[in-house]
Amino acid sequence: MHNKIQNSHILITGGAGFIGSYVVEELLKSQPAKIVILDNLIRGSFDNMASFIQNPIVEFVGGDIRDTVLLEKCVTGVDYVFHMAALRINACAANPRDGFEVMLKATFDLAELCAKHRVKKVIYSSSASVYGLAQHFPTPETDNPYDNQTFYGGAKMWGEQLLRSFKFMYNLDYVALRYFNVYGARMDTDGKYTEVMIRWLDCIHEGKAPLIYGDGSTTMDFVYVRDVAKANIVALVSDVTDQAFNVGNCEETSLKQLLQAMLKVNNSALEPEYREENSINPVSRRLADNSKAKELLHFEPTVNIEEGLKELSQWYFKKKKTIALSI
Ligand SMILES: NC(=O)c1ccc[n+]([C@@H]2O[C@H](COP(=O)([O-])OP(=O)(O)OC[C@H]3O[C@@H](n4cnc5c(N)ncnc54)[C@H](O)[C@@H]3O)[C@@H](O)[C@H]2O)c1
């Protein structure tokens, strides 16, 4: 039980989303007085919230963080804020003005309201995207963000800097968490920006060759969603403030290796087919150095890639079966 959470009032923007819903589940273990979820369900869902939506401690507010009046209502009287509502990297690129309104303007409004209402701490969902293609592997937090080319990465970096300046100006405490590639049960399965893992699981299900675009050498650092939720909890309960932390699994996995692991956990002998790269990916490598989070937050990931892929596969195939039965 974490004493800071017990009896506290907590706001989670984007709490109906993939990671946010796990943060709610983790928080509930420590008996908060109230959790308010503000989410416009552009990507989040009631399915994600199924395990807690009936819990009287949890209040779901269906609304937009761009609605400043509503945002102030949600922030008033709150002890802690997790700011997780955001657009995906591709959505920001497709519509940068929306990206500006959600990632920058609404984040500014939120920080201002948190300072005004004396929120005790903000936990900000940042991203490894701030690094663009990093200079060092494993990548420490001290790598600079000048190589980032994306609106999303720039917006996340700005969010961190905004909170730094609010700490300096208004003494608003915060921690920023730079998640690497988060995966796990409840990840998006049918949105426009569905991840490669889900497409491969579909192939395994249908016995079709999984496709790899490019030569499969691009690497990522896949961190399981429950570990990311735990990082959020320790960031809140620790006395650390005004810091950014990497949250990765500290394992570099190429797309080829990822597919091999996925085929292995599903006992599949399918062979991949390679296709020409159809999008420009400026980031060919990701590998986190988590030592700062280990030292200051005592955070360490616990789920290895095979365990994580097994859990993801079981969840996804069960979900497919349920959908098939309901048709
Ligand atoms: N998933 C990853 O690999 C990853 C990696 C790095 C950082 N992040 C960050 O972590 C956070 C959570 O990501 P996620 O993977 O759970 O994504 P997600 O899309 O599942 O969750 C985001 C939630 O925010 C909500 N939302 C979006 N715009 C909103 C708005 N204007 N008003 C209210 N709600 C809004 C969505 O409906 C969704 O439920 C985000 O800030 C994301 O940028 C995610």
Image (spheres, helix red, strand yellow):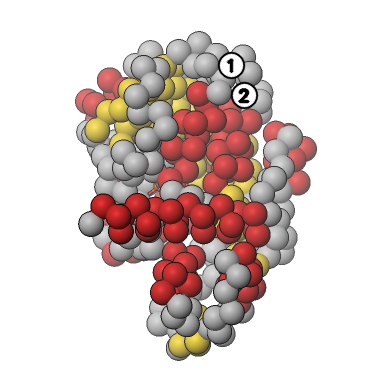
69 or 261, which is in the foreground? 261
Q: Of the numbered discs in the image, which one, if any, rests on residue 225?
A: none
At x 49% / y 38%, what residue is drawn? 22
Q: Circles 1 and 2: CB distance less than 8 Å?
A: yes
| Residue 167, x across and y down, in percent | 53, 28
Q: Is residue 19 visible?
A: yes
Q: Taking 297 as reference, is 228 left or right?
A: left
Label 1 environment density (alpha carbons within 10 Å; few <14, some 14–19, many ≥20): some
| Residue kind at label 2, given as amino acid type | Val
| Ligand 1 closer than 8 Å to label 1 CB | no
Residue at (26%, 40%) from the top-left corner? 40
Percent x, y for residue 74?
A: 32, 22
Name above or below for residue 96 compared with residue 50: below
User: Residue, x 57% and y 74% (percent of image)?
Assistant: 268
- From this view, report whether residue 221 is shown above or below residue 4: below
- Give 140 or 226, whichever is nearer the viewer: 226
Judge whether 201 appears above or below 64 on screen.
below
Q: Which residue in the protein does label 2 denote?
A: 237
Mark 1, residue position? 4
The front one of 322 and 301 is: 322
Observer-nearest residue: 178 or 105? 178
Q: How many marks?
A: 2
* Element carrying mark 2: helix
Q: Amino acid at mark 1?
A: Lys
- Specify the farthest residue to the front: 325
- Residue 192 rendering spot, x and y as whole percentages: 31, 63
Q: Is residue 103 visible?
A: no
Q: Position of residue 316 (x, y in %)?
A: 44, 56
